[in-house]
Image (cartoon, helix red, strand yellow):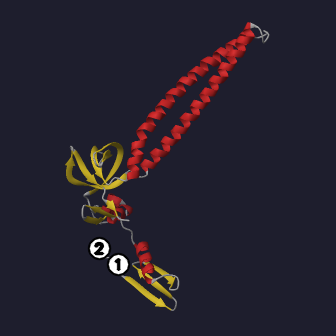
Amino acid sequence: MSSPPEVVIVATGLHCNVRLGGHSRSVSLKRASLTALIMGCLSTASGSDIRTVGQTKVDLQPIHDWKAAGGSKTNEAKGRGERPLSHWKDITVLEYVKSLGNPVVVVKLEGGETQTIMLKNCPATLVANLIHRPPLDQRLKAAKIITQKVKANYLDRSEKAEASARAARGATWDSPLGIAQTQDSQVAKDAYEDLARAEKNETAITEEFETLSKAIESMNKILAMYTGQSYATFPIWDTGITSR
């Protein structure tokens, strides 16, 4: 890991100017302690992504910087070399399988290969969302089937009501044809209300499923390293513990 850049502090009266690399900040000494000022400049000048695997800490920020600079094609063209920390890979977590002390998940590795792995330190929120998605998907499928059945019933009842209306033209309301028309019309109305409720329920579940899927997509692309170990035939990967 490279050493931190030099911090230069120039004080003038009640103000001081702090320069760190290409960044500078002028702050009143009455409003901020010197320590807070330096830490603020450090956080502005450079980021970090510190992970702990076992007893080893590693800063993955060089990977993020390399990507931000344009990735492999741009960096190689500019002579910046290959991606740093090449044993850390981008993986996309697709599906939760089970837990064996650590989550067993289906992932897409760099290059597009799909593999089932054990993933240590997988974010808890991601695991929870992946667990919740299959039953929600089943609810959505069931809701669509119900909507189809209710719609078919409504169309059938609506046709019968229209046929009764045509047959009852000119008949009095209390005649057999008039009574049949009234009854069929009410049945058709009830069927329509059933359809409206079914469609509303399907829409609500669809929105919930789409929201959950977007949440998963926003967090399922992560950096992890293969540990060289396996458990119950599953290769063990580790995202590391993120320093707070």
Q: Which residue was labeled with disc 2?
A: 2
Which label is found at residue 5?
Answer: 1
Q: Quadrant of residue 104?
A: top left
Compared to 138, does 113 lie above or below? below
Q: Position of residue 113 (x, y in %)?
A: 28, 44
Left or right, 164 with respect to 116, comes to right
Q: Who's the residue at 46% across and 82% down the image?
A: 33
Q: Quadrant of residue 79?
A: bottom left
Q: Could you tell me which residue is drawn at 45 percent across and 49 percent down?
A: 215
Compute the Cα span from label 1 to label 2: 9 Å
30 left or right of 125 in image: right
Q: Which mark is residue 187?
A: none
The type of residue carrying mark 1 is Pro
Residue 195 appears left or right of 172: left
Front in this rendered view, residue 152 or 72: 152
Measured along the vertical axis of the image, is residue 76 above or below residue 107?
A: below
Task: Give the residue type that dot 2 points to.
Answer: Ser
User: Which residue shows up at 62% across the image and 23% down it?
Assistant: 191
Where residue 61 appears, x then y in whole percent?
A: 34, 65
Q: Position of residue 107 (x, y in %)?
A: 32, 46
Q: Is residue 194 above or below residue 213?
A: above
